[in-house]
Image: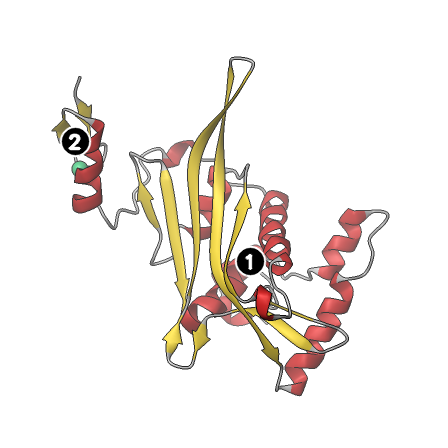
Amino acid sequence: MTLRCCLCQETFISRKLLLTHERTKHRNNKTIPHFHLLLRPSFEQLISYQDAFIILIKKRLGFNRHSVGTKRVLINVFPENVFVYLFQSEPSFRYNTVLRKYHCTFKGEVGEQRLKQILNYEHWSCRQDPITKTTGYVLFVNYEESHEVTFSWTQTKLVENNRTFQCGVVTCTFTTDSGEFVNENDEKKLQESESHITTPTTKNNQSQYRIILPRSPLQQLFLDQKHYV
Ligand SMILES: [Zn+2]
């Protein structure tokens, strides 16, 4: 049996050799051969998964020494087209065709700002303890060191009663830290934002949700990033 590299058509006698070939010859590949099969996600679908990232990342932020370090967020069923739509324009976006795996990395202050645009939310990376005022946050720059946030999507199969269910798993890894806010304006803005987030949502979760995550239209955001506030 021969296997063909779908990026350059070279053939190999084993999957292992094909994998090695792709890792060396197409290490920075951005081409998605089946891209035409990926539907453009709906606006509602995008908002839903952007919110999922924001909420799950915020849940990993804490206010004491135990909440400092490397964290990982998993979303077990994540549509491939949503991942591609959110990240494919990024310089660090990569696709491995053999493993069916996407990877995207955000580093330093530039990465932090870019994720505000992609997730369409200013305060996605921090939360504040309303009593102690300590802030837990995703760490991007520490003294002279830069930290990364990585997003990866990989295809997996779930089997139940002899039926196979194919789905995508997203993993997001990042480093967290906590400390005191020094900028009063930032603190005020954060408090306002967080006070909405911690509001109990017993009924009509959906409409409450739109208020806690105020957004400008996504299309405008991607077309003209300067308008983003
Ligand atoms: Zn190739």
| Residue 125 appears anywhere in the view | no
Label whose residue precedes the other's in the sequence (2 or 1): 2
- Please state if 112 lies on the left or on the right of 29 as rendered: right
Q: Is residue 194 above or below residue 43?
A: below
Residue 9 disc label: 2
Q: Which amino acid does label 1 sit on?
A: Leu
**Extreme-right residue of the structure:** 203
Residue under the image location 48 percent in, 52 percent down: 172
Does residue 50 show up?
yes
| Farthest top residue in view | 162
Q: What residue type is labelled 2?
A: Gln
> Is residue 132 placed above or below 137 in the rendered structure?
below
- The quarter holding residue 105 reads bottom left
Residue 119, position as x, y percentages in the image: 55, 58
* Residue 68 higher or lower than 36, as above or below: below
Pointer 1 residue: 119
Q: In this view, does 165 lie above or below 221?
A: above
Quadrant location, ligand no. 1: top left
Residue drawn at 54 percent across, 61 percent down: 221
Quarter location, residue 60: bottom right
Find residue 101 and name its label.
none
Query: Is the residue at mark 2 in contact range of ligand 1, meaning its CB lies under 8 Å from it?
Result: yes
Q: What element carries label 1?
A: loop
In the rendered image, which quarter contains the N terminus? top left
Question: Which residue shows up at 38% across the image and 75% down it?
Answer: 145
